[in-house]
Image (cartoon, helix red, strand yellow):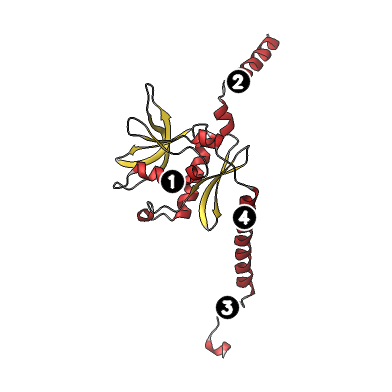
Amino acid sequence: MKKSSFFSSIVTSVALVSCLSPNTLAQSKNTYSCINYKGKPTTVVDTSRGKIQLIVWESDYFQNSGWTPNKRCQEVTQRFQEFSDKGILKYVTTGQINSYPVICVGTQVPGGGYQCQKDGLLITLQKNDNPNKVLENLFTNAAKVGGTPVTREPTGKYIFPMSNFIENAPIMTETDIADIKVEEKEVTTEVTSESKAIKSEPPLIECSPLLCD
C-alpha cells in the first residue's frame, strides 16, 4: 500500500507540472526592475532571453496625483512582479474600481472581450483621466522598441498583450546594458561621496558660552 501511494504521488506531481501553461512557466522566470536609464525612471524586465525595456515613466498623466515618476515606477514595477509571479500577467487593460478609472491586469471573458482581473489593480487614475489614452501613453515605448502596440477591441476596450510582448520584443543591446551599469555606478559614487562628506565634517559641540568662549 505504501509503495502504491508513493508512486501515485509521483504521477500526480508530474501531471500537475505538465498542466502548467508555457506562459505561466515563462513568467515565473521574469524579474521586473525600476532603474534610472538615461536620466528617466524605467521599468525593465529580465527574461530568459535577456533584458527588455518596458515603460519609460515620463508621462504627465500622474502629475496631479502627487506621485513622482520615480515613485510610480517603483510601485507599479513591484505590482508587475507580484502578478508575474502568480502567472496572471498576460494582458493589461482598463476598467473601473470604486467609480475610479484604473489600469489593471486583464483577463479574457467567456464569449469575447476583457475585464480587470480580481485583485489585479496596477494604477488608479483621476476621475477626469481617459484610461485608454493613459494605457496607450504608458506602452508607447514598447511599440517603439518593436513590441506589440496597444490594440482596441470591438467593445471599445484597450488591451496591451503583455505576455506576447515579453516573448517577442527585442532585448536590450550590450551597449544599453553597459549604459545602465555606468549610471548605477555614478549613482553609487554620488551617494558614497555624500556619505564621506558628512563623516568628514567636524562634530557639533554644544556647550554654554562660558565654556566655549
Which quadrant of the rendered structure holds the C terminus? bottom right
* In the displayed structure image, the side of residue 203 where residue 96 appears, left or right: left
Total residue callouts:
4
Query: Between marks 1 and 4, how big is the CA–CA gap?
Result: 23 Å
N-terminal-most mark, 1 or 2:
2
Report the residue marked by disc 4: 179
Check disc 1 and report the residue beneath it: 138
- The reply to whether dot 2 and dot 3 touch (C-beta < 8 Å) is no
Front residue (pair 195, 172): 172
The residue tagged with tag 4: helix, strand or loop? helix
Q: Where is residue 40 in the image (x, y as percent from the top left)?
A: 51, 56
Side of 163 where 153 appears, left or right:
left
Query: Reading the chain from its start, which is encountered first: label 1 or label 3?
Result: 1
Q: Nearer the N terminus, badge 4 or badge 3?
A: 4
Find numbered disc 1 in the image and state the secondary structure of the residue it sits on: helix
Picture quadrant of residue 104: top left
CB contact under 8 Å: marks 1 and 4? no
Name the residue that disc number 3 marks: 204
Q: Which of marks 1 and 4 is nearer the N terminus?
A: 1
Q: In this view, does 114 lie to the left or right of 74?
A: left
| Disc 4/disc 2 C-alpha distance (Å) | 40 Å
Residue drawn at 60 percent across, 68 percent down: 194
Q: Are marks 1 and 3 in contact (CB under 8 Å)?
A: no
Residue position marked by numbered label 2 in the rendering: 18
C-alpha separation, residue under disc 1 versus residue under disc 2: 35 Å
- Of 169 and 30, the residue lying toward us: 169
Closer-to-camera residue (120/136): 136
In front of the other: label 1 or label 2? 1
The amino acid at mark 4 is Asp
The numbered mark, 4 or 2, whose residue comes first in the sequence reads 2
